[in-house]
Amino acid sequence: MASSLTTFTDEARIALDTLSGRASGLFSPSLRLGVTGLSRAGKTVFISALVHNLIHGGRLPLFEAQKSGRIARAFLEEQPDDAVPRFQYEDHISALVNDRTWPDSTRAISELRLTIEYESASGWNRMFSSGRLSVDIVDYPGEWLLDLPLLGKSFADFSREAFEMAMLPVRADVSQDWRTLSATIDPNADAYEMTARRLAESFAAYLKACKLDERALSTLPPGRFLMPGDLEGSPALTFAPLLLKGEKRPRSGSLQAMMERRYEAYKTHVVKPFFREHITRLDRQIVVIDAMQALNAGPGAMADLERAVTEILSCFRPGRGNFLTDLFSRRIDRILVAATKADHLHHESHDRLQAIVRRLADRAVARANFTGADVDVVAMAAVRATREGTVKQGRETLPVIIGTPLKGEKINGETFDGKAETAIFPGDLPEKIDAVFDVSEADHRQSSDDPAIRFVRFRPPKLERTAEGVTLSLPHIRLDRALQFLIGDHLA
């Protein structure tokens, strides 16, 4: 799909940008790491924990360069792109460490440069390598990435698919108001701004309802309808799908003509620059997903998450080039799909969580015809909010996780105040993972009294301090494995 998202002119600009970047990289090696995922999946926490552990020498036994003592130091530098907002690392760490609150979610693109000074494990590499690598971490919302397939779709395609999705069982009730309003609108009627506004607001309200915890749906383009930023209220966001009859050209001055024009403007001025200026410049990518939230919501949400991962992977430029092609075009040669919040489960269920993510990634890779890059999966927690223990219940010993549930979280009728630490038996993920993707089970669940799988959310942990009063690095689960896959080879 990625090859159909740009014109010849776009490709020429991308080639010039890449050549310029490669030239500067001869003297200052750098790696651009993209971090994306849908809202509240944990992108901000992942980046903050990654940087904090490298700067403070955290416990990273599976990160070979750190384990072997070859990293001299890691530190932040000015980012190379002055037009991109800086990732506010210091504010996010303050929230995690001092306030024990989760930092604000990603709302727009941001960037941070982390420079690592190291000694190569190879004597040959030590002769020719500077022993210095700058990792430019690019944080962007997955909702924006899900807009990229729109570049290959006409307004009629977009409208048809939007209504088809809206009538799925998991969406039908929350889309009812928008579909009812749309049914009263004649696309051939004269364009009227207030009609366009009513339709856009109703459509956006439906998309936002799909994001609530009880739905936890993922495939919700256009992404700026959920995260408008400085485009809020602009004509480029004041459009909506229409119930069209046939494929004939719209009458000039009609509502359909207005909507098509704004849809095309959205693609031209919002979606395409994002792809050209950011996605095509990436070397490595991690896709962070909140499988726990989707599991809470049931098979319909899991099927929708699989659809979203498929569309996300289809938008990258995967593969490995050679010396000549790499001068003019960047390819993403490693992609990691990471299920966050593994600390919400006892470690006995981590393999099952990873198997679920593997199923998501493998099917998405196959459906997206995705080849040419190494793709791996991991169940992780960038910041571990719980610890493990056991409790006696009669003659049975149950594995539990111990932490401080967020204020307002509920278990068996008990509402937590956000202060008390408690031990929770989180339950087990099903042994047969097909069940979590079986949409027919969703209809059964909704029509019965069977509760969905439920996981509660926890506050960040209280960090330990040394005898000298030094705060230790943020605890994690498999952050070191993620680091080794994403950048380890560049530090060999």
Image (cartoon, rainbow, N blue to C red):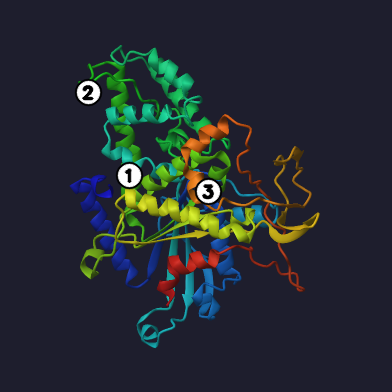
Label 2 residue SS: loop
Which disc number belongs to residue 247?
2
- Going from N to C along the chain, the mark reached first, 3 or 2, is 2
Q: How far is the residue under mark 1 from the one under mark 2?
A: 28 Å
Question: In this view, which residue lies farthest toward the bottom?
Answer: 123
Q: Is residue 140 visible?
A: yes
Q: Is residue 100 above or below residue 134?
A: above
Residue 315, percent from left and from top:
33, 48
Q: Amino acid at mark 2?
A: Glu
Q: Is residue 79 left or right of residue 332?
A: right
Residue 355, percent from left and from top:
49, 56
Q: Is residue 293 left or right of residue 330?
A: right
Q: Closer to the camera, 103 or 229?
A: 103
The residue identified by callout 1 is 273
Label 1 residue SS: helix
Q: Closer to the camera, 86 or 368?
A: 368
Which disc number belongs to residue 291?
3
Question: In this view, which residue lies farthest toward the front?
Answer: 395
User: Which quarter of the figure has residue 183?
Assistant: top left
For the residues labelled 3 and 2, say whether their Cβ atoms are less than 8 Å apart: no
